[in-house]
Image (spheres, rainbow, N blue to C red):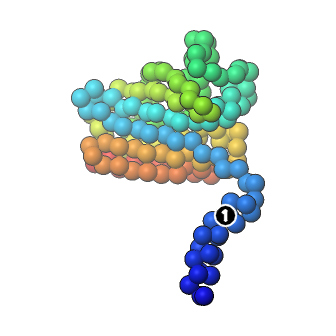
């Protein structure tokens, strides 16, 4: 009888945690990958559409995002992304180039890349995307270079990280 009670508690416990509160969790995902053959760093951001719309609205552009966007809206997204996604190497900021945008259901995928002739030993990465919108926004960062992967959570109180890329 004891074992069946333990199994029941083990199965029911996650459901209790889910039902316990309506606290929303704000998360965006950023994937960085260094591609030596192209001498570039690719970045893909996965962001909830309504959150991105709020950020654009706060920055003066009240839009509804969809599958096909006018160039002016894509440029506004790019300006926002550049402002809130910074990679610094030897005191210089990487210059991002807009690659594109896609929307799938309630998620937007943002694509940028930057020229990197070679991979530095270290870099400073700051991602404060949506931190002005949500106090508890977390940006999950995955960085991949030369077969090595690093992952970091960047909340508002600590939006940057020193990457070791060797």
Q: Nearer the viewer, residue 144 or 123?
A: 144
Quadrant of the rendered image containing residue 77: top right
Q: Nearer the viewer, residue 117 or 19?
A: 19
Q: Is residue 106 left or right of residue 110?
A: right
Q: Is residue 66 left or right of residue 140?
A: right
Image point (52%, 51%), residue name: 153
Q: Outermost residue toward the left?
A: 37
Position of 165 relative to 46 (above/below): below
Report x, y in % for residue 133. 71, 39
Q: Nearer the viewer, residue 69 or 6?
A: 6
Position of 137 relative to 102 (above/below): below
Q: Is residue 21 visible?
A: yes
Query: What residue is pinned by disc 1?
Result: 15
Report x, y in % for residue 126. 51, 41
Image point (45%, 26%), residue name: 112
Quadrant of the rendered image containing residue 89: top left
Q: Is residue 33 left or right of residue 73?
A: left
Position of 20 relative to 157 (above/below): below
Looking at the rendered structure, the secondary structure element under dot 1 is helix
């Amino acid at each position: 009888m004891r074992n069946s009670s333990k199994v029941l508690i083990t199965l029911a416990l996650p459901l209790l945690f889910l039902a316990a509160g309506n606290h929303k969790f704000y998360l965006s995902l950023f994937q960085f990958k260094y591609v030596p053959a192209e001498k570039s760093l690719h970045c893909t951001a996965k962001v909830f559409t309504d959150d991105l719309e709020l950020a654009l609205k706060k920055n003066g552009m009240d839009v509804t995002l969809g599958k096909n966007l006018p160039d002016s809206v894509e440029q506004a997204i790019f300006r926002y992304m550049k402002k809130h996604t910074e990679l610094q190497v030897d005191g210089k900021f990487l210059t991002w180039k807009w690659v594109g945008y896609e929307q799938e259901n309630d998620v937007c995928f943002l694509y940028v890349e930057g020229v990197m002739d070679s991979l530095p030993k270290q870099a400073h990465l700051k991602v404060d995307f949506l931190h002005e919108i949500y106090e508890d926004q977390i940006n999950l960062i995955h960085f991949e270079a030369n077969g090595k992967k690093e992952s970091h959570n960047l909340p508002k109180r600590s939006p940057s990280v020193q990457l070791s890329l060797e």
